[in-house]
Image (cartoon, rainbow, N blue to C red):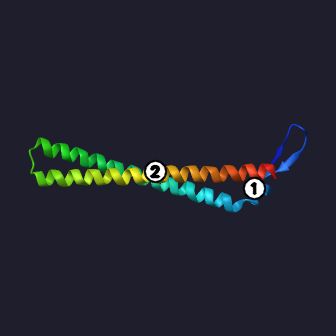
Amino acid sequence: LSFAFHNGTRTQFGNNLFAYKHLLIIGIVTLGSAIGFALGHRYVSTDALSSLIRTLRLAKASATDEESAREQEKFVNSLKRSSLLIAAASVCLVIGTACIALAALAALAA
């Protein structure tokens, strides 16, 4: 890969970028982790929604307090896990994007 600039010079971007391969690998791994955390969030949040619907159905059917309390506790736990997963996904997304951007900027500056 090479880029031409307005002043007529060219730079070999691929060779320069390869010099920052460790930063690129960290960026790719953290972006992959962000994908995994986001998928985990989707699964857990769907589970939380189904727990909420079950809780509402139990309340409407006048179920025992024990069943309703168990479903409500499951709902709260699912929400906590969901919030942790989406926070982890966000952090990994920022770190991965920053690593790849830094590697690209460093390669262009070299």
Residue at screen point 33% across, 50% down:
79
Q: Residue furthest bottom?
A: 22
* Residue 43 x %, y %: 37, 52
Q: Identify which residue is drawn at 11% across, 51% down.
A: 65
Q: CA distance from mark 2 to mark 1?
A: 30 Å
Query: Who is closer to the viewer here, 63 or 39?
Result: 63
**Amino acid of disc 1:** Leu
Side of 11 where 102 appears, left or right: left
Seen from this angle, which residue lies furthest right? 8
| Residue on which disc 1 sits | 17
Q: Secondary structure at mark 2?
A: helix
- Horizontal placement of 36 versus 31: left or right? left
Residue 49 % position (x, y): 29, 46
- The numbered mark, 2 or 1, whose residue comes first in the sequence reads 1
Q: Is residue 51 left or right of residue 18?
A: left
Reading the image, the residue beneath label 2 is 87
